[in-house]
Image (cartoon, helix red, strand yellow):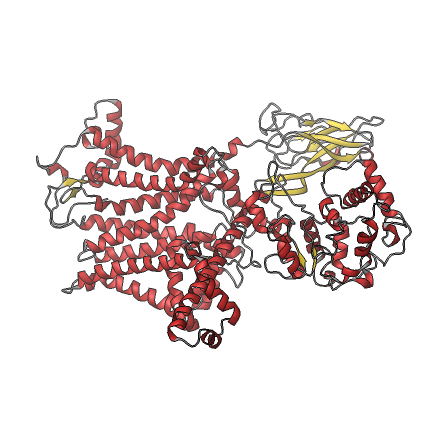
Amino acid sequence: MTGHDHRHDVRSGAVSAGEPRRGFLVKAFAIACGGLASLVPAAAGVWAFLDPLGRRSAAARFIPVAELGAIPADGVPRRFPVITDRTDAWTGYAAEPIGAVWLRREPGSEAVQALTAKCPHAGCSVEMGPGGRCFRCPCHNSEFTFDGAIVAPSPSPRAMDSLECEIDKEGRVAVKWQDFLAGVAGKVAKR
Amino acid sequence: MNGPSATGGGRGPLGRLADFLDDRTGYRALVHEALYERVPGGARWRYVWGSTLVFAFMTQVITGLFLWANYAPSAQTAWESVWYIQHEMAGGWLLRGIHHFMAQAMVILLALHLLQVVIDGAYKAPREVNFWLGLVLMVLVLGMALTGYLLPWDQKGYWATIVATNLAGIVPVVGPSLQQLVVGGNEYGHHTLTRFFALHAGFLPATLVLFLVVHLALFRKHGLHAKQPITRPDAMFWPDQVLKDAVAMLAVMAVVLGVILVPAVRTMLAGGTVDWGHVGAELGAPADPAEAYAAARPEWYFLFLFQFLKVFEGWGATGEFFGAIVVPGLVMGVMFLMPIIGNWRLGHRFNVAFTLGIILGAGLLTALALDEDYCSLWIDKASLADAEKLHEATGGDEAKIAEALGNDASKIAAMKKQLARLEAWRNSHAFLEASRRAKVEAERAVELAGRPERIPPTGALDLVRHDPFLRGPKLFGLADGKDCASCHAFVDPAAADAAARFAAASAANLHGFGTTAWIRGLFDPKRVAGPEYFGNTAHKDGDMVAFVRDEMSDPSKWKPEEIEAVTVALAAEAGLPDPVARPEQVAHGRTLIADTDRCGACHTFHDNGTEPGSAPDLTGWGSREWLVGIVTDPTHERFYGESNDRMPAFGTTMETDQIGILADWLRGEWYRPLGHGPVKAAGAAAVR
């Protein structure tokens, strides 16, 4: 950082033969030193900034969400919160709602169908549609039948995401909780 | 950075693009203007300091922005997010390390730049305004250093900031309001952090950039103030001075990286594994307004001010006002007047002498401050034995000391010196002890934060406050001999000074309470009436002592394997992880304890039918629940009832959860990371 002395207003163009011509190596060395010194903080910053790329979603696991008896066998889905321990960077939350599922049972059947309440279009929360005859997402009006299929025309690229379901001997219903990428045609689990 | 020869011509596609850009922006003239400036007398190393400062500032901006991307300023998230950056994020330790140490490098570079400008007389006409701008920039940098120190919200930053903001409060008239505005209220908390963060990352750097732009523009206007006399031919800024500047920048960065990495490299060379979270900038325990922090010190570059204030200690608030506001204000005032003073005949010499004097004075004060804190490391305490004895005998009473020395004036003077050294040693020792404890607490806080459950939403301070390992010794009164420790010893019987410390206690040793080792000592006829157990209590001549001495020591009444069975059965009640006893041995022991002809004659045990009140219930003896019960109320019929000896019912003075923490600590139950004990050996020994 320097300039010309105020007494001589001489530009480089007027520099005489007395001006030493510096070789390529000197310039390269100056750029290398300055570049290297500046690279260090930038590299450290980018290294830390990229940290989230190395992090994975919690592994998919079965989380109990309801008693079988709480799901009426009338073919109409009921919404249940998914409650489990959750980690958000440095904070650990005990028993927090992390999402919701729609559970449904056909008359006379023990089998439970589980659909995640997260809309596969843009990730809003799917609700019961008007009249209670289908699902509807309030954000962009995607509609789905009770078994999750798209009601055309729909902005959603795919049907609602089904989740694996397990019922233990005591009649507790657990779903294999997983988060899927929104906005794509395929059902792809988040990393 | 290209010279005209590299960009001119415009024959290839690149050249044509350059021509296009130059046509639209005129960048070649700009680059030319920036690079091709004459340096009268040629490039010199003494001109690099300004450039290194700009480089240091840019480093702070870059690392600061990336830190900002991960920092959360609030009382429950500041420490936590910094912990996450330092210990969990890839490269976070390096990012924070560079920011932390470059801040310190910047203070040194500021001093060098100022010194060079004053010595070379670069503040004189026509550069006065630029000198003043430089002084403003200096104050801004120091302000950023001060505000940045608080942001991790650890004990160190928190208590240092309390001192700094209290000093702001002593400014006449506006002081208290100023303090309230900076702190964001009357209490330190969320708004202290949000305000300090806004100052540190917003107001101050934005102001600094404004001043810096004008500073650089004026610098270019007046040109470089060349070192006189000019003996060598002029040179160009590019590449001659740029090369020197770049080498200096790289050197600064190398020093910063060295400070961060050298300890880690040494660990590696010694064959150890490096815990990268502990490399670089320190992170203390979370700020705790309830835990005064004896090791609180400002960052080293403010240590001279801290020491300077001590000069005025006896003067009260006036002294503080004088030392913290008036004198630094006068010094800054003289510096602002330097361009005018410099016009007088001896003015320049005065300015140089003044600046050197201030820097030397600050250095001297820093050395004094360090000496006060660390002198116990080099004062030979053995040489102060006489002074120590005399001090103890007289209680420091001057008349008594004079009498003891036969009123010999020379002896009294010599002794006074020794006594002063003794006090210095003690103060330093207390500081080092506080620093060591602070280190243990910091490491433990980090360990707790790293649990798989992570930090609760209430914050890391909550974890620290409920940690038996940290809190237990304080509740017990281990360090100051209060509370439990005012009667009970807590000493490993294998310790060298165990006997003396047992003798000094007036109730049983609780170290290892609930373990087979502790019970074996109780059943030892030689130890039961010693100070380690009942020797210094009303139970010295009680039924238990008599029972151990007369009955249990008689092999015809108690076979050794029966005593052992009772021992392991009692330890099983406590439920501590002990060498595993055989189930049938425990069952045998339980029968013997319940037996109304043996232990059960006095002690209740499960449903053995003994009337409660004559001796403590042995059901769940030594368990957490049992310990909470006896500490809450030892006079309850389940425990000592009317035969309770002096032990207060702490249920009236302590919260139940605190008694629980105490019980957990006595039982040695606290979180331990896999692979090693809490805070490793040195730390554990330190807290206990």
Q: Is residue A81 above or below residue B645?
A: above
Front in this rendered view, residue B480 or B459 = B480
Q: Residue at x 24, y 56 (%)?
A: B131
Residue farthest right in this picture: B609
Total numbered labels placed on residues in the image: 0
* Residue B549: percent from left, percent from top: 80, 53
Q: Is residue B194 above or below residue B422?
A: above
* Residue A160: percent from left, percent from top: 67, 28
* Residue B70: percent from left, percent from top: 49, 42
Q: Is residue B294 above or below residue B102?
A: below
State which quadrant residue B579 falls in.
Answer: top right
Residue farthest left in this picture: A17
Q: Residue at x 82, y 58 (%)?
A: B543
Q: Residue at x 39, y 54 (%)?
A: B300
State which quadrant residue A30 falls in.
Answer: top left
Front in this rendered view, residue B471 or B432 = B432
Front in this rendered view, residue A148 or B513 = B513
Q: Is residue B483 above or below residue B44?
A: below
> In the shown orientation, is residue B554 left or right of residue B484?
right
Can the viewer see residue B390?
A: yes
* Residue B513: percent from left, percent from top: 71, 49
Can the viewer see residue B182?
A: no
Front in this rendered view, residue B301 or B617 = B617
Q: State which quarter of the image contains the N terminus of chain B.
A: top left
